[in-house]
Image (cartoon, helix red, strand yellow):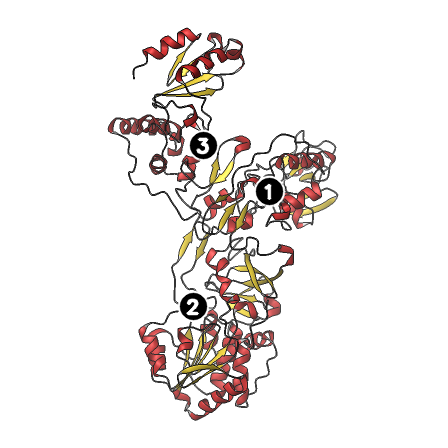
């Protein structure tokens, strides 16, 4: 640990911490653009200048230093300043304040100041730092450069005029995605970010790697813009909630940004051991099904080969009737790798305690492709909770959870199947279709009309990750929380709540009021999940022992 | 708009002689990327200007991304991304040459060739219709003692006057 004096604070920081981070840890802002904790540090924006006292507490070093590249270390006793400090730093001295003002004036020289029409306004570092650290006016009277707006790839636009050439996006493509599509063209004040093009401007290569959306997040100004979010909403109108991406088994930490009428965008949230600062575009842009107009809103039942909407009471009594008719061995209950641990736990309890069946299966999205990047992996398993669902469905009595071929064999021989799906879009292969077709009475809990609901006798409207609370267990054993953002459409309900209502028809003793209660029950009953209560998981997650 | 990508139909290859030269020069650098400038010069000499095919080939040879090559090509004004004349005339217009009447020489060249001066982004503006000459202004050519000077491709011509220009242009082979 190094002992430093930061302005008037005496603080201890880890060896190797840079001044920007040390200050941030203690609530002091050192404005910066090019520095990003997940990338290399070229120190080219010059915004994080600080006063450094390396030899005496009286005299600062002759030149200002960049805070991002100044790391502190504990030094031997004879080199300590005033006998105790490893370094003394001032971020509030008059010449630091003056330097910041001047740097900002330079950065704004070619900036169009078009905040009223800029998507970034409200979450823009250039805006915020100008307000807090900048001049109130510019002395620049020459003509500004007006380079053209550019289309870089499937989801990314570059408003070149707004760019301050911090090169975060270039370093991201070089270091994290390793694809290197971005670079600088031209010289000096005509520098522009671009993809390789011919002289006429036609691209030779596009910014189309699966991590490309991250450059929009790390752009400190309004230069790189997501086409998906462009002109959709002002950021300050959006509500935010911490959650987990449901796109694959990595379990990236995300922030869901939403309004009453649906989700607007998804941004990655830092988690040191899982996704660092990043997420992939499949997860980022894959939320649209939540807002879909086709979402199931009411229960449906099959009347003469057609699904018609019905009341909850009607659907529940129909289900109860069918389930009481059959022997436990003729029932298969299938949980979902898209559903939360809580959903699957209640389902498992229902199957075990009420239906007395041991035939539990696991359904989920079909595997995709694995993508490996130098600092990121997108996994092939496209379900957020395969590990959790498998453990929890199998926890009751040491059930073997049926999957794949064996599951469909059992389904083909069953009279009643209760299938929880919640998979956004999934095709069924011939075996699956045939097996489900043979079932006398198929109960499907889903979010959208799908190949599975087509075969169902009763369809119950469930919820997506955005409409319920719960936990997912990722492929590396992290249990993490998803949180309810918007209300479910129509009369759709959280999947565990639906199962509980069916169970109550049988007089089962199910009295869970919210997902957190189920998590406590999981912690009591499921091996390894002892610490996985919502309270302990919080925003950071809990790693299974 | 963004989904249109240039498909390179005829890939660029060094001819035998240039390939030998490339193999020789690549050995002089500690890392391959460091050979970027000489490789690009070599390619430009063969192809006349830097096409997307050239950039792709150079990127492969030097094991860098195409963008890194594009970066260098746009940084230096001596690399052309559009066709230029057989003879590229660079006229110095910095102070010593200006004091020694480079403007007279330039005006004479413009009148004689019937073309304007090329800009970095529009080389066609300074190229004659027959594609023989491209006229461009450059900063100091490091020969102030013999100002005004011009460079025609790789050769320097000193102490110029309109008469000397006439003489020079006539002796250049077609």
Local packing at callout 3 (Cα closer than 10 Å; few below 14, some 14-19, many 20+) is: many
**Image height of B82 relative to A479, above or below:** above
**Would residue A401 be seen by someone viewing this image from the given angle?**
no
Q: Are marks 2 and 1 in contact (CB under 8 Å)?
A: no
Label 3 lies in what chain?
A: B
Circle 3: element type: helix
* Spot occupied by residue A539 in the image (x, y as percentages of width and height): 60, 62
Q: Is residue A425 left or right of residue A431?
A: right
Q: Which mark is residue A33?
A: 1
Per the model, the C-alpha gap separating discs 1 and 3 is: 25 Å
**Would residue A56 be seen by someone viewing this image from the given angle?**
yes
**Image height of A8 relative to A332, above or below:** above
Label 2 lies in what chain?
A: A
Can you identify the residue that label 2 sits on? A425
Q: Are marks 1 and 3 in contact (CB under 8 Å)?
A: no
* Spot occupied by residue A434 in the image (x, y as percentages of width and height): 32, 78
Can you identify the residue that label 3 sits on? B74
Mark 1 vs mark 3, foreground winner is: 3
Comes first in the chain, label 2 or label 1: 1
Circle 2: element type: loop
């Amino acid at each position: 640990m190094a002992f430093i004096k930061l302005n008037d604070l005496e603080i201890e920081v880890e060896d190797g911490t840079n001044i920007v981070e040390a200050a941030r840890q203690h609530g002091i802002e050192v404005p910066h653009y090019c520095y990003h904790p997940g990338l290399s540090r070229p120190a080219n924006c010059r915004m994080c200048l600080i006063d450094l006292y390396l030899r005496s507490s009286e005299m600062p070093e002759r030149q200002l230093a960049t805070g991002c590249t100044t790391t502190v270390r504990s030094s031997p006793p004879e080199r300590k300043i005033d006998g105790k400090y490893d370094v003394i730093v001032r971020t509030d001295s008059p010449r630091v304040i003056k330097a910041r003002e001047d740097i900002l004036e330079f950065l704004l020289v070619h900036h169009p100041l078009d905040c009223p029409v800029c998507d970034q306004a409200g979450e823009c570092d250039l805006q915020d730092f100008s307000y807090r650290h900048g001049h109130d006016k510019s002395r620049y009277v020459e003509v500004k450069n007006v380079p053209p707006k550019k289309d870089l790839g499937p989801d990314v636009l570059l408003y070149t005029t707004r760019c301050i050439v911090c090169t975060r996006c270039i370093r991201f493509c070089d270091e994290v995605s390793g694809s290197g599509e971005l670079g600088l063209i031209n010289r000096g004040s005509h520098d522009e970010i671009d993809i390789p093009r011919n002289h006429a401007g036609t691209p030779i290569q596009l910014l189309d790697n699966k991590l490309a959306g991250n450059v929009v997040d790390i752009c400190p100004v309004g230069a790189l813009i997501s086409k998906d979010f462009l002109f959709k909403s002002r950021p300050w109108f959006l509500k935010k909630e911490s959650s987990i991406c449901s796109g694959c088994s990595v379990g990236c930490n995300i922030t869901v940004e939403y309004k009453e009428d649906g989700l607007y965008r998804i941004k990655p949230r830092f988690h040191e051991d899982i996704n660092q600062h990043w997420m992939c575009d499949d997860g980022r842009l894959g939320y649209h099904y939540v807002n879909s107009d086709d979402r199931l809103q009411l229960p449906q039942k099959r009347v003469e080969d057609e699904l018609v909407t019905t009341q909850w009471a009607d659907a529940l009594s129909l289900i109860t009737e069918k389930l009481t008719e059959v022997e436990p061995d003729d029932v298969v209950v299938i949980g979902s790798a898209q559903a939360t641990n809580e959903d699957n736990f209640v389902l498992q309890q229902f199957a075990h305690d009420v239906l007395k069946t041991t035939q539990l299966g696991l359904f989920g999205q079909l595997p995709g492709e694995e993508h490996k990047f130098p600092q990121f992996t997108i996994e092939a398993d496209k379900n957020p909770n395969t590990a959790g669902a498998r453990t929890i469905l199998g926890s009751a009595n040491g059930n073997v959870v049926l999957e794949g071929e064996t599951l469909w064999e059992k389904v083909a021989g069953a009279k009643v199947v209760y299938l929880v799906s919640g998979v956004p879009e999934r095709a069924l292969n011939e075996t699956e279709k045939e097996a489900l077709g043979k079932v006398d009475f198929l109960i499907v809990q889903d979010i959208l009309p799908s190949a599975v609901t087509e075969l169902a006798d009763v369809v119950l409207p469930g919820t997506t990750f955005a409409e319920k609370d719960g936990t997912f267990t990722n492929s590396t054993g992290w249990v993490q929380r998803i949180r309810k953002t918007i209300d479910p459409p129509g009369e759709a309900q959280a999947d565990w709540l639906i199962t509980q209502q069916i169970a109550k028809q049988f007089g089962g003793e199910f009295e869970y009021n919210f997902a957190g209660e189920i998590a406590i029950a999981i912690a009591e009953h499921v091996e390894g999940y002892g610490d996985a209560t919502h309270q302990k998981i919080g925003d950071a997650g809990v790693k299974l022992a | 708009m963004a989904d249109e990508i240039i498909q390179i139909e005829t890939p660029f290859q060094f001819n035998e002689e240039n390939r030998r030269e490339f193999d020789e020069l690549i050995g002089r650098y500690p890392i391959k990327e460091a050979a970027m400038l000489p490789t690009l010069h070599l390619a430009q000499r063969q192809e006349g200007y830097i096409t997307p095919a050239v950039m792709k080939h150079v990127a492969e040879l030097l094991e860098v991304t195409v963008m890194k090559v594009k970066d260098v090509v746009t940084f230096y004004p001596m690399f052309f991304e559009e066709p230029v004349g057989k003879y590229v005339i660079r006229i110095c217009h910095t102070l010593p040459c200006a004091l020694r009447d480079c403007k007279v020489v330039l005006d004479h060249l413009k009148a004689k060739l019937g073309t304007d001066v090329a800009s970095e982004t529009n080389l066609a503006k300074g190229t004659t219709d027959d594609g023989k000459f491209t006229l461009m202004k450059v900063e100091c050519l490091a020969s102030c003692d013999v100002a005004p000077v011009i460079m025609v491709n790789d050769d320097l011509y000193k102490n110029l006057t309109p008469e000397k220009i006439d003489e020079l242009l006539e002796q250049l082979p077609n």
